[in-house]
Amino acid sequence: QRNGKQTSVGFTISADDFPIDDRIANSLSGPVRKAYLNRRMRGRARLNKVRVLFHLADDGKAFESEFRGDIEARDIYMDVGLPGGQSVEHLTGTVSITQGTANAEGGRMSGQLHDARFELSNHQIHGINSRFEINPSKLTLRNLTFQTAGGTIRGGSSADPRSFEYQFTDRGKIYAYMNYQGLRLRELLKNEALAHSKVRGICNGKVIIHELDGGDFLDMRASGDIGVHDGRLGTVPLFSAIYKHIKEDKRPQFTMGRVEFIVKERKVLLREFNVRSNLIKVEGEGTLDMDGYMDIDLNVPRLFGSAANILILPPLLNEVFAKIVRFKVYGYIRDPKIDHLMPFSPGFARQSLAPIPPVPLASGPRSSSK
């Protein structure tokens, strides 16, 4: 087809078993091509009447293609650059391209992602739906929704529908805004170390990644809040200093909690931290450094009120003691220290990081090989 000073050639492609691999990068250019190759995608796809139109300039200096249609992903692997080499596996779903162009500048593409699912770090992510836009500088997902761990995650806010944005810089820069509701804590913590954990609860809240440059989690900026209800959070060993004042058979199981956090300047600032049981409420705030050092102040406004009958302390001292005692949790996560923080107490010096002790040898007879 002739159109002014160019010739257009179009055709429709349908295929039941189309390979997804590095060869697709031959049709891309610029940052989009580099980002695609970095993902190391492997798998198969079904092309459902994908319409492709090539525009060839008569002078041979300009080239552009247009495309639209549905692509059904089938069991695709993708490296997403997470620490530990974790990757997206068994990705399926339908990508409906409403408008796509490719040219020397890299091109653009927009459309809708329908009912996708994949596996990441032994977690099933399913029911994924989102609008998407790709241009030479970034990938943007809007109005993203999906289900995992028994709950729902919805991206974006009323002021900004962006759920996820990936900028095609040298290292890749990420922005994300996720609201989550009804996530089961035990499933979120599911891995080999916590496979038999009795911790449970329902999580609600939000997480905002304001900026994550490449895989540099040390310098990322983020904020959000985490709330847990209908839970069994254990006796929380960090509060062992508090338990010294409670009869052993009356020590509470915390059933709900909440914390607001801000991540910046290589620190996690904990705001409005609290956990509760039917007898106790513990509040606090503090910091957690990216090297694992914590410095948290705790107070117990409800320990000596309605729970006074479970205390070992003499009843006449309960009210006075409640007003003056606080607790300091400090040190590295693997070996924190807990002390009473009385009025006019001197500050606590930052603890040095002790060497990690060697792993003890397993006891019992050893089998010998001959």
Image (spheres, rainbow, N blue to C red):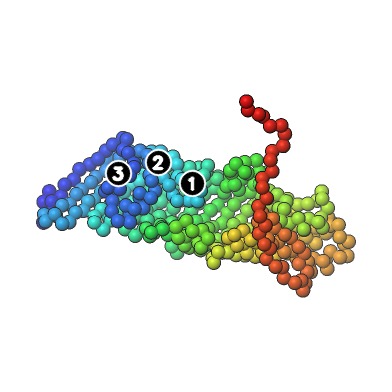
Q: Secondary structure at mark 2?
A: strand
Give the image quarter of residue 359. top right
Say above or below: 105 vs 15. Answer: below
339 over 38 or under it: above or below: below
For residue 204, what is the image quadrant? bottom right
Residue 303, x across and y down, in percent: 78, 60
From mark 1 to mark 3, how far is it between C-alphas? 23 Å
Mark 1 sits on what residue?
A: 86
Question: Badges 1 and 2: C-beta atoms under 8 Å apart?
Answer: no
The residue that disc 3 covers is 23
Residue 127 in the image: state x and y as whole percent. 46, 44
The crowding category of the residue bearing disc 3, from other C-alpha atoms within 10 Å (few below 14, some 14 to 19, many at least 20), is few
Three-letter code for the amino acid on which mark 1 is drawn: Gln
Dot 3 amino acid type: Arg
* Residue plotted at (71% across, 32% down): 365
Residue 275 appearing in the image = no
Amino acid bearing label 2 = Ile
Q: Position of residue 335 (x, y in %)?
A: 69, 55
Label 3 element class: helix
Spatial CA distance of label 2 from label 3 is: 15 Å
